[in-house]
Amino acid sequence: MSPSAEPAPTAAAVPSPSLSVVVPIYNERENVGPLHESLTHALQSFGRSYEIVFVDDGSKDGTRDVMRELAATDPHLRLILFRRNYGQTAAMAAGFRTARGRTIVSMDGDLQNDPADIGRLVEKLDEGFDVVCGWRRWRQDRAVTRLLPSRIANFLISRVTGARIHDTGCSLKAYRSWVVRSLHLYSDMHRFLAALGVGIGARITELPVRHHARRAGKSKYGLGRVFRVLADLVGIKMLIQFAAHPIRWFSLLALPLFVLAPAMFALGFVKVHRDGRWTWFEDYDMAAVAAGSVAWLVAMNVFLLGFLAELQVKVSKFFRHRISITAREASR
Amino acid sequence: MSQAPLVSVVVAIASPEGQPRVVVDAFGKALVDGGYRCEFVVVLDGPGTRFEQELREVSARWPLRIVRLEGGGLGESIALSAGVAKATGDLVVNVPPYVQIEPEDVLKVVKALEAGADCVATWRHSRIDPWLNQLQSRLFNIVLRFIMNMPFHDLNSGTRGFRRQVLEEVAVYGELYRFLPVLARRQGFRVVEVRVRHREEKGRAGFYGIGVYLRRLLDILAITFLTRFTQRPLRFFGYLGFGAIAIGLPIALYYLYFRLGEAKESLSDKPGFVIGAILAAFGVQLIGFGLVGEIIIFTQAPNLRDFKVEEHIEGGAESPDHKAVEFVPPPPEPALPDAVPLPDSPAANGVVAAALAVVPAEPAAPPPELRVREILPGEDSRWDSYVSRHPLGTFFHRTGWARVVAERFRHHPHHLVVEEGRRWLGVLPLFLTKSPFLGKNLVSVPYSVYGGVLADDERAQNALLARAESLGRELGVGYVELRHLEARPGERPRSPLYVTFRCDLPEDPAEVMARIPKKARAEVRCARDPQAAAIEGKRRETFGIRVTPDGSVDELFDLFAENKRRLGSPALPRAWFRGLAEEFGKAAVIHRATAPNGRTLAAVMSFCWKDTVYAYYSGSHNDVNVTGVNNWIYCAIMEWAVEQGYRRFDFGRSRADSGPAKFKKNMGFTAEPLHYEYLLVGPGAKLPDFHPSNPKLDLPRRLWSRMPMFLCNGLGARLSRFIP
């Protein structure tokens, strides 16, 4: 428990801390000082060697000056500064790339997560999980604008992706480093990190964490995000289940059309008379024949697109790269 | 001079009319006079040979590089990129191959870059070119400002400044170089505009033609699309695809229904069917395209240049000898029942002070100002250890209580702490509660019987109270309620409504019963002892009730809610009790009393903290009072507390002269007045009179007690949020 049990930490003496905390920060001038203080307090009393990685996502309100001042005195603090705003996912990806710990914790920079929960998450991770997601069980947000869309999104994400997590939007998560290193984050993917983790065989669980109401600064999310999350879901589902063999997913997409096409042809070529007799190729319903042809054409198209996707996966080094990373991290 | 920043000037020459020599001389002089180092990159795109001789001559005077684009005629965007690739400076200024602006004004551009801008657009202010050109240019910029919502006045100006990183990230091609400031701004770079004096203009005079403008607008649309959707192709194709399906499928199904139904209408004269079917099929295909795009992006993600780190700082690097701020973890809480806590361990504070003295240059001789602030996430353990060290600290001051209040009732906490330097001198837990009955108030602490200020001295206390008052004013509250158990220094309006009951526990469990007055003791004996001598009005079959500390939250809640309905007041929600049980674990004990026939008659939730057991929430069936179980369960809890090693028993507050107060007195307790104090903040604020003994509440209470249980519980859970 006591920090005196460890040798005095200096930048050189801590080549590879056991715990890295990655915090993307955007325009949080008032919060960054208190955040650093409470993080330091929580991590020192947790008692493992640690580093804090603050990623400034192009703040324009002087946040980075505060961060520089903090970094001048704290050898545990590492800063990554972006010149412009790339978005939260990029900031997180940069932080993950820089982090050296075997355990990586991500959290929000707006003090809504409680640093005191980090210890609990990491202990849970030690029980044999690869990802532990925070669950803001008692959220302190406005009901309609944030809570409801988030409920809907979470329900859908957990249903569709199979990662049974209540709160995918919570940034407070703990990972084993191999998980984040084998996933390349881009464009809002951080929300699906848990789901993607399931896709690469990580063991995932969740833990209720505390959630504080915002102290300062402005919230950066809105209602419109839900629709984007919905559009992303289809792609994520494919990436989780079929990334290695996308043609299966495309076949699934084409299947209804493959079924529909013969049905339409039957409708077009077969005539059922009033007395129950039926005849072929006598009276045609050309519209049905046209619809059947279109369905057939598109079904073939989609199926062949699957081939293209398959080709792309085969050509890219993506999976080989992932396998090598997983192997390397496991042997660390 | 070597310290001066290096400015790279890039000049692209595409036509034989350029005057590179004049440009280089003019800008070189201006920059050097302004205190900068400069270098020039001249890109020859096209009929360049004519200038080579001239440029070689200039390169004797100025550092100059010549880039010759093979073939030529590749356009200004490519010329610019090639030039920047050869430039060595971080700050780049792009000028046309003639002296378009007053050379001194280039310093404005460079200064703006140095001041933190990433890209600088120029605005030729008093223009000197023909009025027709001016008019067209102005119209174009007005339209662009309107469509794109961009604050630029003169995008056609050939002089621009930018940092190298901008061109590395913003892809420019075709005629897009013109829109560099717009694109840079869209991608989140800092872009400013500076005014420059116009000196000379080359280029075509007269009407440019509608095609030129149309092309430029199409350019901007293309770049908008690409920057927005290349990262997530499925978003774009998915929207379109699902939209097409959503429109086409119902139309097709509608006609199909009539074809297959009774009417057997042929589809052939229904063009709507074919259109609907094609639309739906098209939608599926679009989604397919989106998915292919997604696969490509996903597999290529490692190759995407998705962000660029500007600076990487390792903490503590600036002063390696500098000792870091070492946080001293709070001293462990004193072991539960033993050791009466000290006011504020001077040893612990000494450690903090010593550790901190290393950090500031001067260890601050005069006593630092008291600073009052709200606590931060992560300081909970520090808060709790302060509360547990403070002699007046109670269970309800702890952050655990606050957490459950914030989580289950969604009241907003404003916990204040006063510190001197880094040393804490006092704490005040506060919650903002809003209620249609009581208005908006700050309460310390809601749903508890004790709360209020804990401070080392009066100065710290007053600082906290002053801040609470100003916070109340900021938040527009009526009053600040401080549920003090003991009196605190100073005069404040006080409510005499409540008293509390406490006692020290004996050493021996057997003594607990001996201390209970005779009449109550007889009740206890009847209830506990199956062999007790019968007394008047008692039935033998209820003798021998067992009390065990293993009650469940649900049992307690049901009994509690039943009691509350009888009294005509809304009960706290079940979730509240669950929350307390989860938060405090073994420190929240539920005792239950079971009759010989196995029926649970009564239950009490008590909190154990330090040396005290707080019997807090209780409930019993309406018909069991006669058995004496109420006396017996508290007696049993006290005996249990003694066995567990606790020293004090807290029977909780009651309204003076109410039934419960009489009951507690009968058990041998004496009433202690509570010092509930108020800071009246809002205009016309007065002490709250919303409590059960208010005659105005008589009717609602009687109605409440006649409502069905499920309604009471459902409504009560909502209402209790408003009665903190």
Image (spheres, coloured by chain):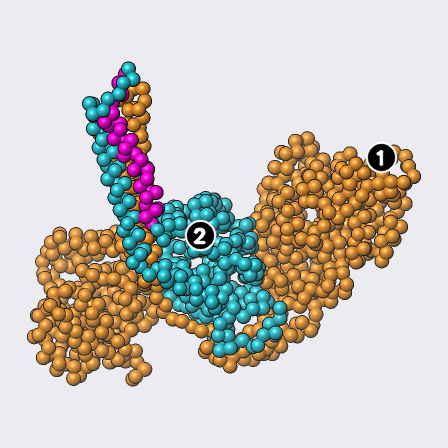
Chain colours: A cyan, B orange
Q: Quadrant of residue B490?
A: bottom right
For label 2, count other residues whose C-alpha is less than 10 Å away and answer few (under 14), some (14-19) or many (20+): many
Q: Could you say where residue B146 lies in the image, as x and y percent from the top left?
A: 26, 52
Q: Quadrant of residue A326?
A: bottom left
Q: Which residue is mark 2?
A: A195
User: Can residue B633 be seen by looking at this rendering?
Assistant: yes
* Helix, strand or loop at mark 2: helix
* Helix, strand or loop at mark 1: helix
- Which amino acid, by three-letter code, is at mark 2? Ala
- Which amino acid, by three-letter code, is at mark 1? Glu
Q: Residue at x 23, y 62 (%)?
A: B172
Q: Could you say where residue B583 lies in the image, as x and y percent from the top left?
A: 64, 53
Chain for disc number 2: A
Residues at marks 1 and 2 on the same chain: no
Which residues are drawn in magenta?
A: A246-274
Query: Is B8 displayed left or right of B382 in the figure?
Result: left
Residue that sits furthest to the right in the current view: B533
Residue A248: in magenta span: yes
Q: Residue at x 75, y 54 (%)?
A: B613
Q: Foreground: B76 or B430? A: B76
Q: Foreground: B422 or B614? A: B614
Question: Vertical placement of B264 versus B27: above or below?
Answer: above
Query: Is B9 displayed left or right of B646 in the figure?
Result: left
In three-dimensional space, the C-alpha distance between marks 1 and 2, rounded to whole angstroms, equals 61 Å
Secondary structure mainly formed by the magenta segment: helix
Q: Residue at x 82, y 48 (%)?
A: B635
Which numbered tag is attached to residue B541? 1
Q: Quadrant of the N terminus of chain B?
A: bottom left
Question: Vertical placement of B655 versus B326: above or below?
Answer: above
Residue A123: in magenta span: no
Q: Residue at x 70, y 63 (%)?
A: B390
